[in-house]
Every structure is written in structure tokens, then in C-alpha cells.
Image (tube, rainbow, N blue to C red):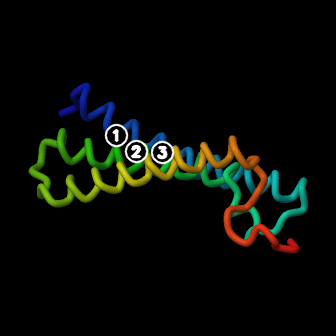
């Protein structure tokens, strides 16, 4: 049976997956315009911030789906997805701060890259 909490939980993980696809699609376009390699692109805050935010929504939606589903879900799965949600949230905030401080196009590792 469909309930408001289960609809919200399922909407979150679907929105998270849509965000992952949209992030890769946009970054593929931006990468071609700026002539970046994928190696460079995957290290930039302009990619990592929306990517980890989307994973935050996805894992949070899966955790909430485990709580609100009609079928019993093992408690350890809900805890594991909740921990992942917390970690992705922390990463998203860290990447957003780094993007604001160092610039959204500056890669995290290997700042002396010749790419």
C-alpha cells in the first residue's frame, strides 16, 4: 500500500539517481567544451559536489525506504544506508567549501598536473 512516508522515501532515491545521471551528463558536456580529460573532471569540486549530494539523496532514500516499507527490512541494512547518508553529506559539504575557497575548477589531487 502506498503511504506518504514511503512515497517520500522512494522519491528521494529516484531523485538521487536522476541527479547522478544529470551530473554525468552535464560534466560530459562541460568536459568537451573546456577540453578536459575525465581524470581532471572527476577531481574537481564542480563535479564532486553535485555527485555526492545526489548520492546523499539516494542513500537517504534507501535508508528511509527500509524504515517505511511494508516488508520487514533487516536493521543492519537501514543502519548501513544511514551511515552512508551521513558520510556522503559530510563529503558534499566539504567539496562545496573547497569549491568556494579554491575555485570550482581546481582539482583536488595533483594540483601540479599538466592536464
Query: SS for tag 2?
Result: helix
The structure residue drawn at horizontal position 20% and vertical position 54%, both measured from the top left corner, is 79
Residue at mark 2 to residue at mark 1: CA–CA distance: 6 Å
Say left or right for 20 vs 15. Answer: right
Residue 46 percent coordinates (x, y): 70, 49
Residue at mark 1 to residue at mark 3: CA–CA distance: 10 Å
Residue 45 percent coordinates (x, y): 67, 52
The residue beneath circle 2 is 13
The structure residue drawn at horizontal position 43% and vertical position 43%, both measured from the top left corner, is 57
Badge 3 vs badge 2, beta-carbon distance below 8 Å: yes
The residue beneath circle 3 is 16
Image quarter for residue 41?
bottom right
- Please tell me how crowded label 3 is: few (under 14), some (14-19), or many (20+) other residues with Cα within 10 Å: many
Badge 2 vs badge 1, beta-carbon distance below 8 Å: yes
The residue beneath circle 1 is 10
Badge 1 vs badge 3, beta-carbon distance below 8 Å: no
Residue at mark 3 to residue at mark 2: CA–CA distance: 5 Å
Amino acid at each position: 500500500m502506498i503511504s506518504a512516508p514511503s512515497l517520500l522515501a522512494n522519491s528521494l532515491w529516484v531523485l538521487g539517481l536522476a541527479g547522478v545521471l544529470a551530473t554525468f551528463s552535464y560534466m560530459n558536456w562541460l568536459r568537451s567544451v573546456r577540453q578536459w580529460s575525465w581524470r581532471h573532471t572527476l577531481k574537481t569540486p564542480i563535479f564532486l559536489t553535485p555527485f555526492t549530494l545526489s548520492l546523499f539523496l539516494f542513500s537517504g532514500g534507501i535508508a528511509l525506504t527500509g524504515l517505511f516499507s511494508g516488508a520487514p527490512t533487516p536493521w543492519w541494512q537501514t543502519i548501513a544506508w544511514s551511515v552512508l547518508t551521513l558520510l556522503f553529506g559530510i563529503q558534499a559539504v566539504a567539496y562545496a567549501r573547497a569549491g568556494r575557497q579554491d575555485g570550482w575548477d581546481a582539482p583536488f589531487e595533483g594540483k601540479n598536473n599538466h592536464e
